[in-house]
Image (spheres, rainbow, N blue to C red):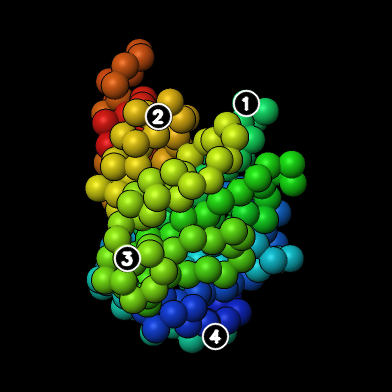
Amino acid sequence: MKQEIVTIHSFEHLTPEILELTFVSDYLSSKAKPGQFINIRVDSNYPLLRRPFSIFNVEENKISIVFNVIGTGTKLLARKKIGDTIDVVGPCGNDFLAFVDGSFDTAIFVAGGIGVAPFTFFTKKLPAEKQLVTYLGGRHSDLIVEKGLRNIKVATDDGSRGFHGTVLDLIKSDLSKNKYGTMRFFLCGPTRMMKAVADFAKENGVSCYASLECDMACGIGLCQGCNIEMTGGEKKYKLVCKEGTIFETQSVKI
């Protein structure tokens, strides 16, 4: 992990609401793993705290992130231009591949809205022998990103695309019709969605891992600001940025 000043290579609208920003970094592109994140200082003065972004994709020496404009930090980031520089720290956190082993046949990716961010890179790096099903959920179609994903099934709350309902409703409907062998769920998205899917997985005896979202000022465990309560073990709390962001869902209080 290290701090770098990197140069923006490109911007692309993946949907009317979601942007992909790509920058050049030989170091990050050689070190990054699926599920890890980078911490970005958007501006040298304000906002003061860095913003965490999952690594969306790696192509040669280029790193991509995706985001929608929801606050001061992302507004400033969206105003950047090709050739501008940004201050990044990374790669941070653990990675999804650490939880891929021989105990399951099918990886079930579940993404809610911008929670799709880690799954394009994960799709690329998932071992070829694993089957894959990808469930995408969003309030409406402009929050659905499919770039680089495989075997996609879509749910929207308003019915503007795919299944009309929540992503959990879609999962239940699909699994009632299709058998995927021994499964393992991998989640990222709104906390409420992840808790609902994690509870469903637990009820059905399926292992489940989630990339948790929270404010992470430093990204390396120094500020102690991203505690998550554990359900057992030696530690009552762990740091999402340093000991996560990916946790087995039964081990944490989501």
* Residue type marked 4: Ile
Query: Which mark, residue 128?
Result: none
Q: CA distance from mark 1 to mark 4?
A: 44 Å
**Which tag, 2 or 1, sits closer to the chain's start?**
1
| Residue 203 versus residue 25 in the image, above or below | above
Q: Position of residue 71 (x, y in %)?
A: 25, 71
Q: CA distance from mark 1 to mark 3?
A: 33 Å
Dot 3 falls on a residue whose secondary structure is strand
Report the side of 90 relative to 74 (left or right): right
Q: CA distance from mark 4 to mark 3?
A: 38 Å
Q: Position of residue 97 (x, y in %)?
A: 61, 40
- When asked about the image quadrant of residue 245, the answer is top left
- Residue 196 at least partly seen: yes
Q: CA distance from mark 3 to mark 2?
A: 23 Å
Q: Position of residue 43 (x, y in %)?
A: 36, 72
- Residue 87 at least partly seen: no
| Residue 4 versus residue 207 in the image, above or below | below
Single out the mark in the foreground, 4 or 3.
3
Label 2, on which residue?
A: 204
Q: Residues within 10 Å of mark 3 (few under 14, many from 20)?
A: some
Label 1, on which residue?
A: 103
**Which tag, 4 or 3, sits closer to the chain's start?**
4
The quarter of the rendered structure image containing the C terminus is top left
Q: Residues within 10 Å of mark 1 (few under 14, many from 20)?
A: few
* Residue type marked 1: Ser
Q: CA distance from mark 2 to mark 1?
A: 16 Å
* Residue type marked 3: His
